[in-house]
Amino acid sequence: MHDLSGIAVFAAVVEAGSFTKAGDKLGLSKSAVSKQITKLEERLGAQLMNRTTRRLSLTEVGQAFYERCRRIVAEAEEAELAVTRLQVAPRGILRLSAPVSFGIEHLGPALPDFMAQHPEVQIDMECADRQVDLVEEGFDMAVRIGRMRDSSLIAKRIAYSRRKVLAAPGYWAEHGKPAHPDELTQHRCLTYAYLQTAQNWEFQDPETGKPFTVTVNSGPLHSNNGHVLAHAAAGGRGVIYTPTFICRSELRAGRLESALDAFDAEPIGVHAVYPPNRHLSAKVRAFIDFLAARFAGPEETWP
C-alpha cells in the first residue's frame, strides 16, 4: 500500500457513519475526508460506499475491505500504544556492551539492584574489550572508559577512575620503589594490549600540573585483559599502570601496593554512550541514571 492514511480515514467514516463526524474525530474537514475516500476508491478501482444526502452504506466490496481495515487500524493503534508505554516506563530488552573488567567488577554487582527497581527490563550484556559498533550490532548502549573517539555517539560521564602504578609489596622490596616515573624504564612493566600506546605511560607533574609521558620497557607479559595483568603483578612478576576499578580488591587486600602517587595523571572518565536518537528509550534513560547515581560521590567511592 502506498498510503495507509486513507485506510484509517475509511475506517473512521464507517464507524462514525458520516464524513462530518469522522472529520471531527480525525481533525479534518468534511471535504478532506471525502477526498481521501475518493482517492482510496480510485486507487483500488472499486466503489466502497454508496453515498446519498441522508446516509452512507457500504457496498459488498466495501464491507469486506472494512473488516480488514478495522484490524489494520487496531494493530496500528496497539503498536503506537506499545511504543508510548516503552518510552514512559522502563521495559523490554536492554542490550548493553561493557569492558570485561568493569563489567565483572562493577556492573555485575550493580545489575541485581537495577533489576529489582525495574522488573520489566531484561538485560542482555556482552562483556568485551573490543569497541562494538552500537548501531550495526544492535546495542542500545555501552559503557566505555577513557577518551571518547566516536563523535557520532552521545556520551554521558557516569564516573571517574584513577590510574595507579602498582606492584606486589615483595616486588617493591626487591627492586625498590621509583621516586620518579623516569625510573620505570628500569623495571619490568606489564602492558595492556588494547592501547596503541601501551608502552607510553602518561603522568602529571605535581608542581606544574603539566602532563608528560614515559616510554617503558615491555616486560614479560602483554595482555588484552586488565585482570590478567593485575594477577601477574600481584604475583610479583612486574609493574602495571592501570585504572583502580580493575584491581581495587587487590589494593585493599594488600596484594598490590601503589607508587608514584604524586604523579597520578588526571582521572579517566567512565561513560555511558548511546546512538543519537531523538527519543531516548525509558529503559536506556533509567539505566544511565541508575549508574550515575551509583557511582556519584567522593573519590573514595569511585570505581
Image (cartoon, grey):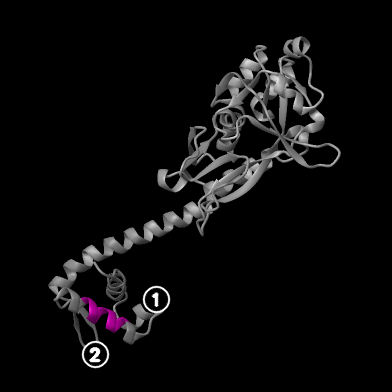
- Point 61% across, 33% down: residue: 110
Where residue 232 appears, as percent x and y from the top left, is 62, 15
| Occupied quadrant, residue 75 | bottom left
Please state which of the two labelled residues, at mark 1 or mark 2, is closer to the viewer.
1
- Near mark 2 (Cα within 10 A), the count class, few <14, some 14-19 or many ≥20, is few
Q: Type of residue at label 2?
A: Thr
Residue lying farthest to the bottom in this orientation: 53
Left or right relative to 206: residue 297: left
Neighbor class of circle 1 (other Cα within 10 Å; few <14, some 14-19, many 20+) is few
Question: As rendered, which of 31 and 245 lies closer to the eye?
Answer: 245
Give above or below for 54 relative to 182.
below
User: Which of these two is toward me, 117 or 55?
Assistant: 117
Q: Identify the residue under disc 2.
A: 53
From the viewer's side, name the closer residue of 219 and 228.
219
Cα distance in 3D space between marks 1 and 2? 21 Å
Q: Residue at x 77, y 36 (%)?
A: 299
Q: Quick one: SS at disc 2?
A: loop
Q: Main secondary structure of the magenta part?
A: helix
Q: How many numbered tags mark residues here?
A: 2
Q: To which residue does mark 1 refer?
A: 25
303 lies above or below 26: above
Task: Find numbered disc 1 in the image and state the secondary structure of the residue it sits on.
Answer: helix
Queried whether the magenta region covers residue 89, the answer comes back as no
Task: Please provide the residue range marked out in magenta.
Answer: 33-40
